[in-house]
Amino acid sequence: MYNVQSSYKRLRKVLMHRPGTEIELISKSNAHRFNYSSPVNTKLCRSDYDIFLKKLRENGTEPILVTDVLKNDKEAINYISRRPNMVYTRDIAVVAGKGMILLNMLFKGRKFDELIIEKAAKKLGLPILGRIESPGLVEGGGVMFFDEHTVLASLCDRANEQGLKQLREILFTKTPVDRFIMTIPPEGRIHIDGEFMLIDEKLALISRPDFELYPSMLFNKRQAPKPIWFMDFLESNKVELIEISQQEHDNLGANYIATRPREVVGYNLNPRVDKEIAKHGGKVSTFPARELVKGRGGPHCMTCPLWRE
């Protein structure tokens, strides 16, 4: 029932959190502490999220809500009711192979959230493969599968080399992964899912300048690490690219969630990108971003895949 070795194959189950009373805690004075641009209209926020859930179900994906899994755990529910960022389940954990890796996040507004997701995983019968320990830092938006044996991870503003080393060691010892590519985006970039998104084996969205400034590092389970250029790696693998502009990047133009190859769900903010995906034989389902976007995360950020096939 749980297995993830891809970023684009059919998404059967995904762990999510529908915004609850916790988003009512966001104010003008504390919004920056939770990485929100401003307080949200709670009614519209939940309404837009419900449209997102509907789009996923229409695409054959079953959302599993954290609060449904833990509904009988009063302590967990009380904790969630005070954590405005719980909606971004992607950053808390990564499912790789048939188990979950618990991550360690930078901001105080997200510390210890992984303990709640660990409770949910245990309720679901999902094995814990390991966890990122301090001072290591890794967030799930900075991690994605290139193929079933290759993981991409960014040394970005929310991750450090200690955390990526721990992640690499867990993947190499407990999953089928045997290649790990550490990309290094420019300063100010948060996660790889803001700059690059595979939507099929040979098709991706990309903010090209983010991968042309610094080299990447290729770690192989059986060979010494070596520096590579990510754009050369994509070319050698014959990946066709849909490039996004800086404005589209700022509008989360790479942050779609694939529900199957070339079928994605995204915010209704980037019509040109949607058209380009359609030109390449893809299908895009969109939903309103008016309130959810205030949390500076997109559909990819709000989904933690549990099962792809």
Image (cartoon, rainbow, N blue to C red):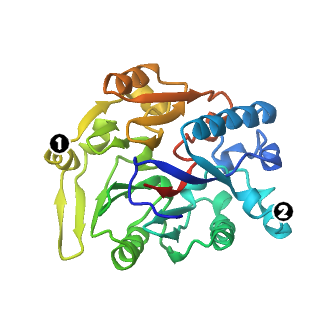
Q: Report how far apart the C-alphas of labels 2 and 1 lie in the structure.
A: 49 Å
Q: Tag 2, which secondary structure?
A: helix
Report the residue at 65% width, 66% height from top: 117
Report the residue at 45% width, 50% height from top: 191
**Depth order, front residue of 88/3:** 3
Q: Earlier in the sequence, mark 2 or mark 1?
A: 2
Question: Image check: 176 left or right of 48?
Answer: left
- Residue at mark 2: 78
Residue 305 position, x and y percent, is: 52, 55
**Depth order, front residue of 157/269:** 269
The amino acid marked with disc number 1 is Lys
Comparing labels 2 and 1, the label whose residue is closer to the camera:
1
Quadrant of image for the C terminus: bottom left
The amino acid marked with disc number 2 is Asn
Q: Identify the mark at residue 238; answer none if there is no mark.
A: 1
Report the residue at 69% width, 51% height from top: 17
Q: Is residue 203 visible?
A: yes
**Figure check: 135 above or below 267:** below
